[in-house]
Amino acid sequence: MPEPTPPAALPSDPAACPPSCGGPRVRAIPPGEDRERLMCPDCGFIAYQNPLIVVGSVVTWEDGRILLCRRSIEPRRGFWTLPAGYMEERESTAEGAAREAWEEARARIAVGPLLAIYDIPRISQVQLIFHARLLSDDVSAGPESLEVGLFAWDAIPWDELAFPTVHWALREHGDRQGRVDGAPAVNPAPETLARWARGP
């Protein structure tokens, strides 16, 4: 492999990798770094692959019921989840959470403070979950949902939740009993998981 261009001179945009190059296709440790990256051996361009950011919210209606969506897509098709998904470019985290609520549940929401930040290294995700308030109870399934519903706490389908982080965010919301103050939660400690496992 040719000696790569020093990092300071590397292109910052994939389009800067000249058409005559073969593009990023080999894995190597660039100078000044400590891990393998996908690189172009012709010009030294580095194709950085970074964790994805998921944004979503625990959305409540005036009576305290919580908005859940039953997934129409894999993974975990048919299981219930919070309205959440990947951030898009050029949007804020709150804008992303509001967009996901509309796309998945046709829900208009007012996004509040951050409820939790969950690190999921095994799938290279960081999840930001907000408190949010439903502006109207007129909701319906979007293209990624089989159905949507507003659930009282004792009616939440705990055994049919799609992902651990959905469970964590709901339990964190319940533990805070509607408060929106305080620092965001993080991945729950083992003792917290054990307490939650004893039941709602």
Image: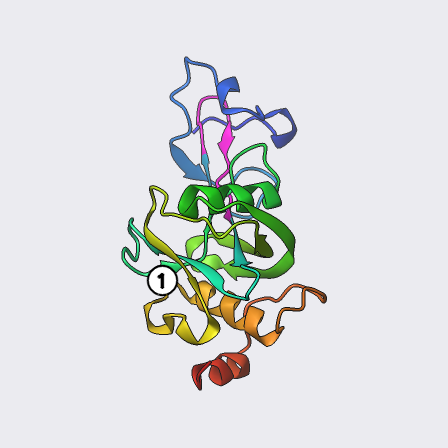
Asked if residue 5 is positioned above or below residue 86 in the image, the reply reads: above
Relative placement, left or right, of 164 versus 96 is left
Compare residues 178 and 10 and report the one nearer the observer. Answer: 178
Residue 198's place in the image compared with 21, above or below, is below
| Residue bounds of the magenta highlight | 39-54
Q: Residue type at mark 1?
A: Ala
Is 154 left, or right, of 182 in this rendering?
Answer: left
Name the residue at 42% across, 18% down: 21
Residue drawn at x 48%, y 53% is 137
- 138 and 123: which is toward the camera: 138
State the SS at label 1.
loop
Number of marks present in the image shown:
1
Residue in front for this viewpoint, 125 or 151: 151
Q: Residue furthest top?
A: 20
The residue that mark 1 highlights is: 162
Q: How is the image coloured?
A: rainbow
The image position of residue 97, as x and y in percent, is 54, 47
Q: Majority secondary structure of the magenta segment?
A: loop
- Asked whether 109 falls inside the magenta stretch, the response is no
Specify whether residue 45 is painted magenta: yes
